[in-house]
Amino acid sequence: MDYRSLISTLDFSLEEQDAILALADRIAASPTESGHLLGGHVMASLFFEPSTRTRLSFESAMLRLGGRVIGFSEAASSSVSKGESLSDTIKTVSRYSDLIVIRHPKEGAAQVAAQIAGIPVINAGDGGREHPTQTLTDLMTIRAVKGRLGDMCIGCAGDLKFGRTVHSLVRNAARYPGTKFLFVSPAELTIPAFLRAHLNERGIPYEETTDMERSIADMDVLYMTRVQRERFFNEADYIRLKDSYILDANKLKRAKPDLTILHPLPRVNEISAEVDADPRAAYFDQVGYGLYARMALILTLLKGGAL
């Protein structure tokens, strides 16, 4: 039986991805019309790392499509805590389900799962490398707010070294013509070498800076990220860097009136609560778009995108 998985943000062509986003738009326009499409199907939700939005949006997406959900929300509540290997967990769970959604702290874990599952697998985040469904969410949000993808400057600020949402978004958004990037971070948290090489090889324009106040005026989209405590081996380094960039009303005075502010969430203090009331803040709307993007992806993998 032929099936597809989504492990990397570039696993689908631009045309296939745009079809998923178009399907997500149709679902968002009439959410109840798809409530029967996956009756009898079971999704396994395997979260070896903590998650609120990604896990609950996937589970909600499957339930809203008429399917059912099994799984666990932390490794401690699975047989991994008894020493079971990832391979054995996947081989077992694949016998119970039609689709596996996996989040894991180790890079490459989702790829391993896809190679042995025998059913579609969705990468819900692996280590600091990839988070492709967050990128679908981000792109759907940008297109809904801006009316386009491409021909814009996307700014990414905060932890760009370990931020898997940034890594996936940049590689994917770079495929749309006219996209350029502004990377704002402390020297210790700049974009990784593989991402820099990806942009250089394709001739995608970008600039790296430590100065948010100067660069924010050039951005059409600002993608804020938190400094992630869980990615640091040294607590002192985390404490030193965690407040490096905080977006507040004063900084936004220099920004374009139609700037779109995104954040994959959770936030800690990198966006001041006063920004929530700014009409340019789209990060909670972004959460809602994530539900429809994941519904469309699940339908595409299990039903070929039929609606």
Image: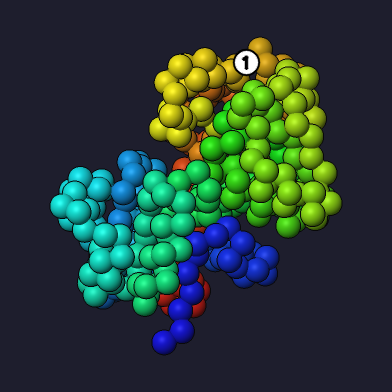
Q: Is residue 74 above or below residue 251?
A: below
Which residue is at the front of the view, 26 or 13? 13
The percent coordinates of residue 282 (x first, y second) are 57, 36
> Whole-percent x and y of residue 253?
72, 16
At mark 1, the secondary structure is helix
Q: What is the quadrant of residue 210 in the picture?
A: top right
Say if residue 158 shows up in the picture: yes
Decide if residue 176 is on the left or right side of residue 49. right
Residue found at x 50% / y 62%: 7
Residue in the foreground of this view, choosing between 48 and 153: 48
**Type of residue at label 1?**
Ala
Left or right: residue 162 compared with residue 155: left
**Picture residue at 66% right of the left edge, 25% below the top:** 187
Quadrant of the rendered structure where residue 11 is? bottom right
Residue designated by label 1: 249
Q: Quadrant of residue 67?
A: bottom left
Inspect this view and state whether residue 280 appears: no
Residue 99 vs 268, above or below: the answer is: below
Q: Is residue 61 above or below residue 283?
A: below
Which quadrant of the figure contains the N terminus? bottom left
Q: Residue 129 in the image: x percent, y percent?
A: 53, 48
Please state the total of marks drawn on the protein image: 1
| x and y percentages locating residue 231 in the rendered image | 45, 34
- Between residue 245 and residue 293, name the one nearer to us: 245
Residue appearing at x 61%, y 26% in the figure: 188
* Outermost residue, top side: 250
| Residue 144 shown left or right of residue 153 in the figure | left
